[in-house]
Image (cartoon, rainbow, N blue to C red):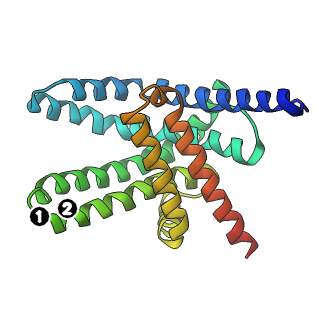
Amino acid sequence: MKNTSGMMGGLYRLCDWFMRFSVGNILWVVFNIPIVFILFNILYVEQKGVQFFLLVPLIILLPLLFFPATTAMFASARDWVIKDESTSLKQYWRYYKENYIKSLMGGLVLTAVWTIWAVDFYYFSKDNAILMGIFLFLGMVLFVFSINFFTVISHYRLNLLTALKKTLLITIGSPVLFLTILISSSILLYISLNVFWFLLPFFTGALIAYLSFSAFYRYYLKVISA
């Protein structure tokens, strides 16, 4: 990066980070175009039968497309945090290919778990406040676990089972990290879904990846220096 200072240096840094987030997020969206198309149809189709029919290809495509693309985005975020490097299509594609099989296999596991959670939440928590609270808590744990999974497989060279175990330890081992990821990601998603929709295609995913990996990396440095 150029050695600039003062107002121009600050402007350069701002533009550089703007490009990192936007390029990383746009690549992530492009690699998930079939999923985006299905989600739009689910949102705008009113018939429940059609919505249920569309859920089948969505569930199939999540491990095939969403998990590898998201892992590549988290690997790019790792470069932003550790190496202070920007993202390019070539670099993103390299991360996508390198981690595809592991992301796919992890995606199969997590998609199955999320599907079971969603079905149980839909059928068992409608008329029971206690069950609803339990399932909401489990959903939050699963949400943070999923984000940590992307972080782990983008940072470590581990087989899938070891990566899942390490993800679980990280998820339950640091309440501060857990709350940081949960709160920051929830706020970003809420703002993106309810206030500024333009953030979704350009910034939301990349910002979540960057903030989550940054929080994890601070935790990681603290652990290895202890």
How many marks can you see?
Answer: 2
10 Å crowding of disc 2: few (<14), some (14-19), many (20+): some
The kind of residue on which mark 1 rests is: Asn
> Is 196 placed left or right of 176 in the picture?
left
Image quarter where the N terminus lies is top right
Residue 45 on image: x %, y %: 17, 24
Residue 121 on image: x %, y %: 19, 56
Vertical position of residue 212 compared to residue 32: above or below: below
Q: Residue at x 61, y 56 (%)?
A: 215
User: In terms of image quadrants, where is residue 203?
Assistant: top right
The label on residue 15 is none
Any part of residue 162 in sight: no
Q: Which residue is drawn at 18% across and 52% down?
A: 119
> Is 192 placed left or right of 15 in the picture?
left
Vertical position of residue 99 compared to residue 214: above or below: above
Distance (Cα) linking label 2 and label 1: 6 Å
Circle 2: element type: helix
Residue 168 on image: x %, y %: 47, 66
Residues under numbered marks 2 and 1 in contact, where contact means CB atoms less than 8 Å apart: yes
10 Å crowding of disc 1: few (<14), some (14-19), many (20+): few
Image quarter where the C terminus lies is bottom right
Residue 42 on image: x %, y %: 23, 29
Circle 1: element type: loop
The label on residue 128 is 1
Q: Residue at x 43, y 38 (%)?
A: 191
> Is 41 placed left or right of 166 in the picture?
left
The kind of residue on which mark 2 rests is: Met
The label on residue 132 is 2
User: In terms of image quadrants, where is residue 84?
Assistant: top right
Any part of residue 216 in sight: yes
Q: Which residue is drawn at 62% across and 43% down?
A: 75
